[in-house]
Amino acid sequence: MPERDGVHTVLEQDGVRLTIEGAVATVALVRPEKRNAQSPAMWRALAQAGRSLPGAVRLVVLRGEGRSFSAGLDRQAFTPEGFDGEPSFLDLARSDDAALDAVIAEYQEAFTWWRRPDLISVAAVQGHAIGAGLQLALACDLRIVAEDVQFAMRETGLGLVPDLTGTHPLVSLVGYARALEICATGRFVRADEAERTGLANLVVPEAELESAVGDLTTALLAAPRDAVVETKALLQGAVTRSYEEQRTAERAAQARRLRDLAGLGD
């Protein structure tokens, strides 16, 4: 793969491009003519991007080329023939439970690796992020959005459910009642509400999105990697631990950090 100005292209297939520059990886959706509409082939490429990250990568930026981050699932999925070489929705419906579960689990792999404990992932979102597009943004740890962003979860209106791992982070960010209302109505969530409810970490003018992501990347890389990894693990675990269990986890993590800083780690 070519290298340009220190940026090395590791993967480019099925609407996904993975580039590496030092400790930063960028995963770009590169179907701007389709508003980065997603397909099973794109999901496999996204899963492959996660498997292709070098060990030196600490931070992953996810972006979509063009006016929209991702308009969701490609409408071809809803046609009787579906995508070439892929099972149509009708074919999936006719599958037995185990086969259907396995196919959906494969699709979900594109959305699961972004919260790995050794990485921090940042979604840079502009324009539409609908359905699978919103779920992909939700797969990341952090979201910086442009002022023109329009989030929506449209699956319920199509007679489906959000099944690409988006329900857990959505409820964690905005709460059960608001998450239910967003999903059941399919309405748009725009930038001001996204920032107010925690769906977005930061809202910036569209022209400043790239520079804002760069500033955040620099800040996130400033701390030692192991300290960030331990802190992320503590925060992720806090959701399911009791107060006392979290205190115990904090003590254990700090003991590991102190021993490591003193040169006494394993």
Image (cartoon, grey):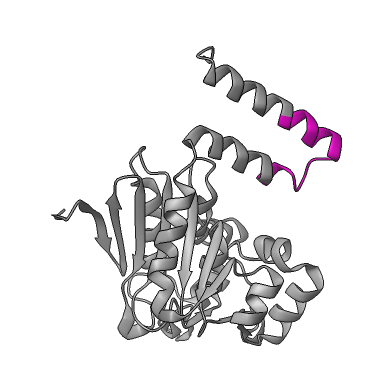
Q: Position of residue 41 (x, y in %)?
A: 36, 66
237 in the magenta segment? yes
Please state the total of marks drawn on the protein image: 0
Q: Position of residue 227 (x, y in %)?
A: 55, 34
State left or right for residue 242 relative to residue 229. right
Q: Please provide the residue range marked out in magenta.
A: 236-250
Q: Can the viewer see residue 39 in this picture?
A: no
State left or right for residue 78 relative to residue 199. left
Up-down relation of residue 87 to residue 127 (above or below): above
Residue at the location (64% across, 76% down)? 194
Residue at the location (38% across, 46% down)? 51
State left or right for residue 75 relative to residue 185. left
Q: Position of residue 177 (x, y in %)?
A: 81, 73
Q: Position of residue 174 (x, y in %)?
A: 73, 69
- Give whichever of 8, 1 is nearer the camera: 8
- Give whichever of 160, 173 is nearer the camera: 173
Residue at the location (38% across, 69% down)? 210
